[in-house]
Amino acid sequence: MELGRNNISASPPPARLAVESINNHKDSPQLLPTTTRITMTGSLSLFSVNAVLVMSADDGSRIYAKYFSAPHPPAGAAPNSTDYPGANPYPTVKEQRAFEKGLLEKTNKSASDVILYDNRIVVFKMESDVMIYVVGSADENEVLLYNVVLSLRDALGILFKGATDKRTIVENYDLVSLTIDETIDDGIILETDPVMIASRVSRAPAADAPNMKNIDLTEQGLMNAWEFGKRRLAEGLRQM
């Protein structure tokens, strides 16, 4: 029994044996250090979107624009710095207008919904007479950004019953703003299901809201309401 215990205690764990046998082989790659380096260099930020734009396809005018900066800039960065990853590359309205003008000109000539412009990945969809853009950094996942622009388009289509045009967007600007806020917050993607987004944005049915126009708030109207309440209370007491 003593011999058995010595044999067990002297044996290294199976996992350690497997790693040592791989690393000690002269032709095997050093897998463990490589895996450690990949883990240390991976990005932990959820920040993905630099801007969301809704523009008129006819005259190139801006209908809606929102630019984002990473919510947590690195320590030591200046307040208005644009040199760190995730910073807003177009902090002034003049720079934003120039970017939007050039972007519209390029997308009008593009046959693809995904382009690289000004070292930014831009995905877009055209609906009637408007263009919906989602802008990300050059190393961002274009499939993720494309899902965002599709969810925005489909959510607006649900809210406006397929009539996503410039006039409808201007008349329902509050719904457009809420739709984008429910999808993206500070450049972080929150939701890509258009049905869920539309359900959170939808207004309450008009039939559920009280119609104040039919309520008589004059002195006589209040007296009539008081008399009506007394009669109903008396009828209820008699039935008890």
Image (cartoon, grey):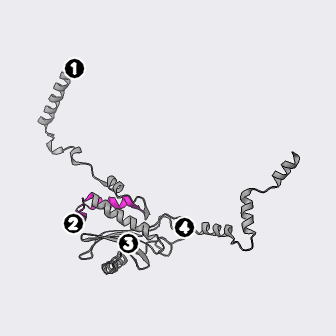
Q: Is residue 91 above or below residue 159?
A: below
x 43%, y 68%: residue:
143
**10 Å crowding of disc 4: few (<14), some (14-19), many (20+):** few
Kindly identify which residue carries mark 4: 43
**CA–CA distance between discs 3 and 4?**
22 Å
Q: Is residue 179 above or below residue 216?
A: below
Kindly identify which residue carries mark 2: 167
Which element is circle 4 on? loop
Q: Is residue 171 left or right of residue 42?
A: left
Which element is circle 2 on? helix
Which element is circle 1 on? helix
| Residue type at numbered disc 1 | Leu
Magenta residue check for 9: no
Which element is circle 3 on? strand
Give the mark, 3 or 2, whose residue is nearer the N terminus. 3
Please state the total of marks drawn on the protein image: 4
